[in-house]
Amino acid sequence: MSPVAVSWAATTHNTGDTWNISTFCTTPTPLPATGTTHGGTCVALNLTRTITAIAAGGYHSLALASDGTVWAWGHNNDGELGNGTTTASTTPVQAQGLGGRTITAIAAGGYHSLALASDGTVWAWGHNNDGELGNGTTTASTTPVQAQGLGGRTITAIAAGGYHSLALASDGTVWAWGHNNDGELGNGTTTASTTPVQAQGLGGRTITAIAAGGYHSLALASDGTVWAWGHNNDGELGNGTTTASTTPVQAQGLGGRTITAIAAGGYHSLALASDGTVWAWGHNNDGELGNGTTTASTTPVQAQGLGGRTITAIAAGGYHSLALASDGTVWAWGHNNDGELGNGTTTASTTPVQAQGLGGRTITAIAAGGYHSLALASDGTVWAWGHNNDGELGNGTTTASTTPVQVQGSNTDMFDVPVINPGVALGLITLGLGAAVTMLVIHRRRTAGAGHRHPLPRTERTRTR
């Protein structure tokens, strides 16, 4: 059957500043875009755009949608939101100027942002005093510019640090650009670079993952070893010293464990082992190592208090750390002045505490910013907590939150679908349609289309309060 265009008008009762048809809505029930008639049930329909990845920067946040678009909110003095302005936003705005490219990965640095396109090119915007955009200049950009000098290599992963950027090529080599006072580019110098340079000294190892911290960098090799370079005053390189290194050195003391993921914070580092344990090293004034102390460590120590849970993902913020457990719960430790641990307090913790207020949702991804945290739920909603002076929580305010709040615009698409007879008044709505359509869909916020055993295109809707 050919798609059918439907125009309709609905009258709803005014339930506040937003129009929500709440008579039937309690808990959403998954429903495919096509199928049998459902009546008197609140359902969730999967629309074109859902969030698939998140990233947290110094004071801004990024989200990648399933249609390959990038959304940003928070601090924007340097154009790190990518929307052509330097105006902060407390709700998501779309990054412009990507020329229709499909973005597959995102990364957020101190005051700049990165995006990886499906064609393997890297795009950057925001702060650029040290060349962290990689386009051969030190001029900030409020819209994406392409990183130059990668020699036609296909990039498979990106990472953004305080003021530097990293890229992993399909041949396993690591490329870096931007700030380099501490050797965080890994090329044997302390000279900043406005275009990518190759990290040296990895001994022919194939690198499978990268991470960028405040002023240091990490790489995970295919043999499960961790390599680090750059700033090391607090031992964030993990090699038993506090001496900075301009080329990669191996993190020691992991006891032969195979590492599967890495994360780099302001001045500390994290590693996830194949047995689900978390290891940390570096700065620890706020307990960000999670081992029950506030003593820095130049070699890895195990994060305690995870209760035997298997951890599947990690994230490192300015001075705090996050872990995602296999049961979908989020755990946090370290600095908490702004509530970035998400446990309803502003008290730092030297061991993991569970983030509260996620309403039983299963979390699939986490990200840690300077002083805020993000979580992506399996229903495509994004949750944020912590510092919010610049709107980095994305909930339309600049008020910090000690528990998760939902980022606006990441709502599950909720619908009321009452079975109707043509022209029958249902109290909340009155609709007259031909007998060919036996399902009414009222969408909560956005334009949508739905069908009865066949898809309908998205249609404009009118409403009257």
Image (tube, rainbow, N blue to C red):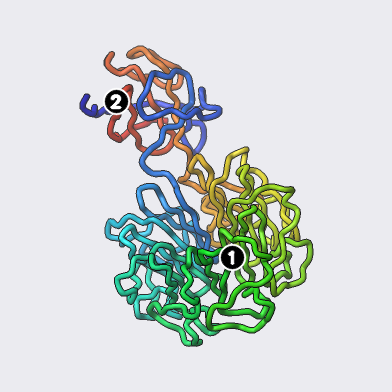
Residue sitting nearer the eye, 159 or 261: 261
Question: Mark 1 falls on what kind of element?
Answer: loop
Which residue shows up at 44% across the image and 29% down it? 415
Q: Give the amino acid at mark 2.
A: His
| Residue 44 position in % (x across, y down) | 45, 31
Label 2: few (<14), some or many (≥20) within 10 Å? few
Question: Mark 2 falls on what kind of element?
Answer: loop
Outermost residue, right side: 293
Q: Which mark is residue 370?
A: 1
Q: Give the amino acid at mark 1.
A: Gly
| Residue 103 position in % (x across, y down) | 36, 56
Residue sitting nearer the eye, 30 or 79: 30
Q: Please tell me whether residue 207 is drawn above or below residue 239 in the rendered image.
A: above
Q: Which mark is residue 75?
A: none
| Corner quadrant of residue 400 | bottom right
Quarter of the image with the C terminus is top left
Instruction: Left or right? Give the position of 177 relative to 450.
Output: right
Q: Is residue 400 visible?
A: no
| Residue 349 position in % (x across, y down) | 75, 59
Q: Please tell me whether residue 378 is drawn above or below residue 256 in the rendered image.
A: above
| Residue 288 position in % (x across, y down) | 69, 64
Whether the residues at callouts 1 and 2 have beta carbons within 8 Å, the answer is: no
Return the residue at label 2: 454
Number of numbered discs visible in the structure rendering: 2
